[in-house]
Image (cartoon, coloured by chain):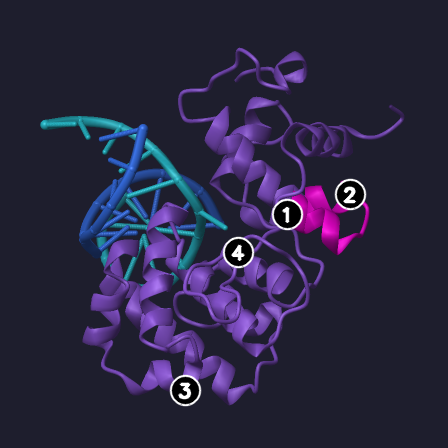
Chain colours: A purple, B cyan, C blue
DNA sequence: TTCCAGGCAATAC
DNA sequence: GTATTGCATGGA
């Protein structure tokens, strides 16, 4: 255990939950997103971006239902998506909540992919209305397999309770702290964020379940 | 019934 | 520059 604490937490979560296989995308011929990694074709890239928009402050279960509707309507494609009315798009993604906002945001990112022929940088993504730092990092990490650590509400909660960060620190500060303390490994970044989400859901909830938490012995519980 | 979930932009201090 | 507020569904 000459490792630093960020690597130590990763190893514990990985042995607790196993590989997560993020980001879930819909396999060819199916309608529902599934967890299994691998290279992304254009459809996969677009679906990661769509999911990243839809899951903003929203449970994945509800997002998955919305993605099913989009698949059923054969709309998991930027050109077809911009061709329908924002009202119809909103009604299809209703289950994901904030559907009026998100329908506009989906069209914005669809237009982006068309104009840029599926090329993206983190900087170009955050210029899109509706794409903030977390959504951009999720797309870069899980759609393009580039080295960007994703910081979300669970990351802030878990690591501030561990006593390793200030939960109110700026996004970029927290992101850089992780990137400075972890191996430069895309697979590790992908699994680590997914494991953080899993741990946040199961144990480090708003009301934490500290009994039987695999990090309990190194947690300051603040 | 109330609370919460894989944020973001607009607005107010 | 930092804090607050609106956006909305479905499940626990």
Question: Which dot marks residue A175?
Answer: 1
Please state the extent of the stretch shown in magenta in the rendering.
A175-191
**Which percent across, then down, holds residue A215?**
64, 20
The residue at 75%/32% (across/down) is A11
Locate residue A162 relative to residue A189 in the image: left or right: left
First in sequence: mark 1 vs mark 3? 3
Residue hosting label 4:
A24
Q: Nearer the viewer, mark 1 or mark 3?
A: 3
- Say few, some or many: other residues with alpha carbon within 10 Å of mark 3 (under 14 / 14 to 19 / 20 or more): some
- Say few, some or many: other residues with alpha carbon within 10 Å of mark 4 (under 14 / 14 to 19 / 20 or more): some
Residue A219 visible in the snapshot: yes
Q: Is mark 1 in CB contact (under 8 Å) with mark 2?
A: no
Q: Which of marks 3 and 2 is in front?
A: 3
**Which percent across, then down, holds residue A174?**
62, 43
Residue hosting label 2:
A182
Residue hosting label 3:
A79
Question: Relative to residue A42, is residue A20 depicted above or below?
Answer: above
First in sequence: mark 3 vs mark 2? 3
Q: Say which chain tag 4 marks.
A: A
Locate residue A182 relative to residue A127 in the image: left or right: right
Q: Say which chain tag 2 marks.
A: A
The residue at 40%/48% (across/down) is A60
Task: Tell me the distance, in whole angstroms, between the alpha carbons under discs 3 and 4.
Answer: 22 Å
- Say few, some or many: other residues with alpha carbon within 10 Å of mark 2 (under 14 / 14 to 19 / 20 or more): some
Task: Tell me the distance, in whole angstroms, between the alpha carbons under discs 2 and 4.
Answer: 24 Å
């Amino acid at each position: 255990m000459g490792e630093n604490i960020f690597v130590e937490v990763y190893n514990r979560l990985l042995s607790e939950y196993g590989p997560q296989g993020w980001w879930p995308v819909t396999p060819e011929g199916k309608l529902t997103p599934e967890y299994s990694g691998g290279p992304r074709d254009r459809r996969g890239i677009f679906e990661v971006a769509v999911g990243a928009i839809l899951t903003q402050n929203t449970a994945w279960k509800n997002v998955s239902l919305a993605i099913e509707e989009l698949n059923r309507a054969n709309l998991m494609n930027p050109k077809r998506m911009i061709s329908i009315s924002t009202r119809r798009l909103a009604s299809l993604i209703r289950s994901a909540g904030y559907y009026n906002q998100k329908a506009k945001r989906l069209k914005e990112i669809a237009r982006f992919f068309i104009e840029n022929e599926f090329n993206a940088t983190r900087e170009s993504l955050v210029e899109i209305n509706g794409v903030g730092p977390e959504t951009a990092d999720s797309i870069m990490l899980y759609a393009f397999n580039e080295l960007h650590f994703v910081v979300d509400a669970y990351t802030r909660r878990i690591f501030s309770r561990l006593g390793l960060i200030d939960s109110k620190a700026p996004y970029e500060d927290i992101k850089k702290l992780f990137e400075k303390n972890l191996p430069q490994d895309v697979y590790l970044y992908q699994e680590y964020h997914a494991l953080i989400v899993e741990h946040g859901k199961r144990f480090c909830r708003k009301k934490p379940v500290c009994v039987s938490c695999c990090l309990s012995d190194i947690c300051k519980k603040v």
